[in-house]
Image (cartoon, grey):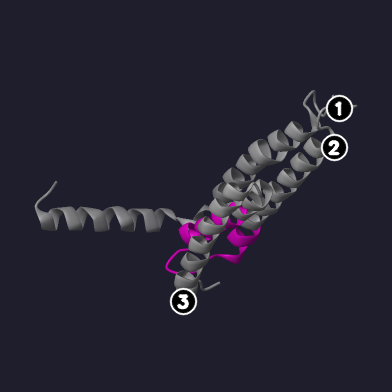
Amino acid sequence: MNIGNKRTGIIIVITVLWVFITLSGWSGSWFAGLISSVILMLLYMILGSAKNGRLSKKLLIYPLLSWSVLWIIGFFFSKYYADIFTGRIPDFTILGFHPSFAFTILTYWIGGVLTLTLGFYFFADHWLSDEDWNNFKDRIKSINSAKGEI
């Protein structure tokens, strides 16, 4: 997937999202800002994971889109159970946690970290292969040697 020619558009969308998230926070619409922040982070990850302006579709689907969906589901259910049990003790717990916090733990923390870690591990060559890393280090060495630095 070629994102090289879409880079400027993505950066403009990121800028608009930052403004929207800030205004959402100021106006008390925190949930809209929270969901928008997931999209913002997804766009940053897309830009950062692209190699020479191209993003692997495998990497886009897993872990990037999977992570985003997991976080949005987690935030939705965290809000849902927080609203249901506002001002009272929940009728049940999930793994000993308040239902709203359980979704935060399971999807946001554990699920999110595992999804990104496993995805970037299994598809490492799609975003930073050993060859690309070595080429980058060689390029930095040549830049430093041209400047007279070690």
Q: What segment carries the magenta color? A: 37-61
Q: Are marks 1 and 2 in contact (CB under 8 Å)?
A: yes
Return the residue at label 1: 90
Label drawn at residue 84: 2
**Which residue appears at 63% of the width and 41% of the height?**
114
Q: Secondary structure at mark 1?
A: loop
Residue 98 picture quarter: top right
**Which residue appears at 49% of the width and 73% of the height?**
6
Closer to the camera in the image, 120 or 67:
67
Pointer 1 or 2: first along the chain? 2
| x and y, in percent, of residue 83 in the image | 80, 39
Amino acid type for the residue under numbered disc 3: Asn
Magenta highlight on residue 134? no
Residue 77 picture quarter: top right
Q: Is residue 60 above or below residue 149?
A: below
Residue farthest to the right, as pictured: 91
Label drawn at residue 5: 3
Could you tell me which quadrant the N terminus lies in? bottom right
Q: Is residue 123 visible?
A: no
Separation of marks 1 and 2 at Cα, in angstroms: 8 Å
Closer to the camera in the image, 121 or 22:
22
Closer to the camera in the image, 4 or 62:
4
Magenta highlight on residue 53? yes
Residue farthest to the left, as pictured: 148
